[in-house]
Amino acid sequence: MASISGGLSRLMPRSSMNPIGVNIAEACIESVLFGIFFVLAMTSLAVLVGRNSNRSSSVSARSCLSERIWTSPLFIATIILLMSVTSHWLISVRRIFDAFVDYAGGQAPMEYYLTVEAPTQVVATAFVVASVIVGDIILTYRIWVVWDRRLPMIVFPTLCTMAYAAMGISVVQLFATYAPGETIFTEAARRRIVVLTSGMRRTNVYGTGSIAYRIWASNRAMKHGHAFTGVGLTVSEALVIFIESAAFYTFWTLFFVVAYAANSLLEAFAFHCIPAATGISFMLIVVRVGLGFHWSQIAGDGMGLVGRRPSMRKPHIPYPPRAITLNVTRTIEQETDYALRYTPDHPHGCSTGEISEEMC
């Protein structure tokens, strides 16, 4: 472990980095990421509310009462992420003014940015921890949904998330009790942060890997079942896997782990952009699932044309058509996740050839 850290330190030397430049760059990049996140969050809320309104207009009042929008896990997670990510971004902006205006009359910005026990630094760390906890909960929920609600699949990420929450609180408490002049790379901080990032990495890698494998295996089985000529991964399928598995979130947290292991000041840049990266990853999931619901009729019609050339000839009808009357006595509503295709061993197939999943 020491040799790895030494090698990473040579790749990202601290002496070549200015804390002021790193933090200003962090504020700029976080602002860009926050803008993307905010647009996606508003789109997610619009999609979820619109879907709920469509459902409310087609089901009985009794059903509507039990399926209100505020009981949806994705809606609740979107609101919580919106609050935590926005709060962290506001603190990052506040820290710029503190460093260059308020702290020591703006004469010591470098000292301010290196002060771990500063109240804004402690609160910002708390919002990072909160955002990651919410992100891991959403990832665990998506594992549960994609794997057909199999509880054994979420035991490991649930335990890792609980461990991360406990250790995250410990890290925030440690930063709040730092003595002046101590750095974030002290031995006490390193022990806790290594344990903290270890739990975060396990949840991320497990979630990304299990979801990506599930989607890939389902799509491959569907292609074999329909005798398609190609069984490779298309661009759209790769994009769905990248979004659904929260790969961007996983890669960004890995960036922070590498930077901290190298004792690089880039760890501050990576660490404080984690909330925005987390929000973007999971808002993409909500938007994808929500729009998949709204485009279900289009997608269902399109699947019938996949793998064959449509015929333009008029079909021959040996007998004249006869009128029939259908009385619909029961309506069944399904929500479909278009990340997953139908496989023969799945009991929950739908008429469009895909696995049905409930988003709420």
Image (tube, rainbow, N blue to C red):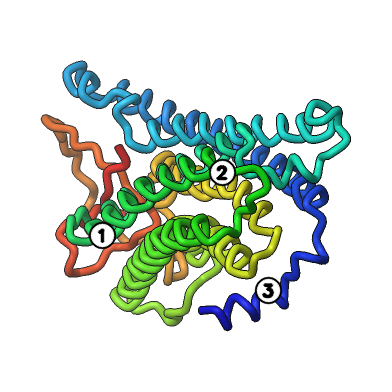
- Find residue 190 and report its horizontal and vertical position in percent: 52, 60
Tag 2 residue? 178
Using a 10 Å C-alpha cutoff, classify the residue at mark 3 as few (fewer than 14 neighbours), some (14 to 19) or many (20 or more): some
Q: Residue at x 45, y 64 (%)?
A: 310
Q: Residue at x 46, y 69 (%)?
A: 309
Q: Is residue 331 visible?
A: yes
Residue 357 sits above or below residue 80 on the image: below
- Find residue 127 and report its horizontal and vertical position in percent: 52, 37
The reply, left or right, for residue 319 in relation to residue 114 is left
Q: Dots 1 and 3: beta carbons under 8 Å?
A: no
What label sits on residue 9 in the rendered view?
Answer: 3
| Secondary structure beneath label 3 | helix
The mark total stands at 3
Residue 128 sits above or below residue 67 on the image: below
What amino acid does circle 2 point to? Answer: Tyr
| Secondary structure beneath label 1 | loop
Q: Mark 2 or mark 3: which comes first in sequence?
A: 3
Q: Quadrant of the C terminus?
A: top left
Seen from the viewer's position, the closer of residues 329 and 277 is 277
Q: CA separation, marks 1 and 3?
A: 40 Å
Residue 127 sits above or below residue 159 on the image: above
Residue at the extreme right of the image, as rendered: 107
Residue 177 sits above or below residue 146 on the image: above
- Find residue 282 and report its horizontal and vertical position in percent: 48, 47
Tag 1 residue? 147
What amino acid does circle 3 point to? Answer: Ser
Q: Dots 2 and 3: beta carbons under 8 Å?
A: no
Q: Mark 1 or mark 3: which comes first in sequence?
A: 3
Q: Mark 1 or mark 2: which comes first in sequence?
A: 1
What amino acid does circle 1 point to? Answer: Trp
